[in-house]
Image (cartoon, helix red, strand yellow):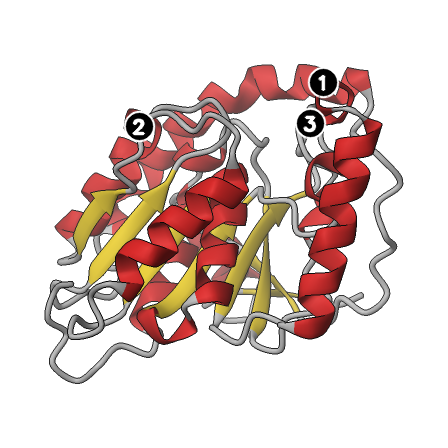
Amino acid sequence: MPLLHADIPNDTLSARLGPALLGRPRPLRRVDVADVPRPAGPPRAGDLTRELTGALELARLLRAAPWLATAPRGREQTVIDLPGWQAPEASNVLLRSFLRFLGYDTRSWGLGTNRGTPERDAELLADQLAARPDKPPVALVGWSLGGTVAREIARAVPERVACVVTFGSPVIGGPTHTIGARTIGREECARIDALARRLDADRPIRVPITTIYTRRDGVVDWRACIDHASPQVEHVEVRSTHLGLGLDPDVWWTVAHALATARWPASGAAA
């Protein structure tokens, strides 16, 4: 399957390698996902050891800072950040700060630590957005389970969501293909999987979605992050681990560009 380097000239070898050596973000956009096989279960126990290297993404992030500073700017549009499972709101404070630097009105989801109740959380946040129909739509950026919640908000109130960006978020099977599957239990995983299949068949998400995944993910089987159902989805591959996604400059670069191409109203006023 072909992969394309995002925003990198491909005319010469030096044009491809030079920016990488200087720290330029280089996410990979996948052109076709039709031949990606379905996930077969949670990652292997040994895969989790890769997550120990996640903190190394900070060095890449610092090296990429000059390039990230050139990312497209916002106009005070509202971006809501949703943390991953058992992660506090502070877990993505650096990404929120970066988006605020770019000119977005960036906020956390306001529910504190993600306790693993995605159906309740999605309903609560969707109701909050629906209660403000006079305000411009917002963008939703979610890490892991936070991305799952973001997707369901967009499904419930698509008119209130400009775009969704997820990273390391299971799209197929709910928790079935994550390291949390055994804790959650087979029956609950089966229930969530059946619900997700039914929703995708009956009410596919029609909001633009950018799905970021990594094959080095030791928490979620990367194949479970591939969205085969949504009509407006773009898949972007990065190289970090699951726990390193929040510090991965390729993720930050992709988020910035996804927000820049979202369907914002002309006014760009905050919600």
Residue 96 image-quadrant placement? top left
Q: CA distance from mark 3 to mark 1?
A: 16 Å
Residue at the outermost bottom position: 266
Q: CA distance from mark 2 to mark 1?
A: 22 Å
Amino acid type of the residue tagged 1 in the rendering: Thr
For the question of whether residue 8 can be seen, the reply is: no
Q: Is residue 13 left or right of residue 195?
A: left
- If you read the primary sequence from the N terminus, does the residue marked by circle 3 or circle 2 appear first? 2
Proximity of marks 2 and 1: CB atoms separated by less than 8 Å: no
Label 3 crowd bin: few (<14), some (14–19), many (20+), radius 10 Å: many
What number is the disc on residue 112? 2
Question: Given contact means CB atoms under 8 Å apart, are the residues at marks 3 and 2 in contact?
Answer: no
Q: Which residue is mark 3?
A: 218
- Amino acid type shown at disc 3: Gly
Say which residue label 1 marks.
183
- Is 172 or 14 nearer to us in this picture? 172
Q: Is residue 189 visible?
A: yes
Q: Dot 1, crowdedness within 10 Å: few (<14), some or many (≥20)? A: few
Query: As rendered, which of 120 and 232 lies closer to the eye?
Result: 120
- Give the spatial CA distance, label 3 vs label 2: 25 Å
When the figure is inspected, residue 2 is found, relative to residue 190, above or below; the finding is below
- For image coordinates 21% across by 81% down, the residue present is 265
Q: Quadrant of residue 182?
A: top right
Residue at disc 3, secondary structure: loop
Which residue is nearer to you in this view: 56 or 256? Answer: 256
Q: Identify the element where label 1 is drawn.
A: helix
> Quick check: 74 left or right of 172?
left
Image-based side of 231 in relation to 167, left or right: right
First along the sequence among labels 2 and 1:
2
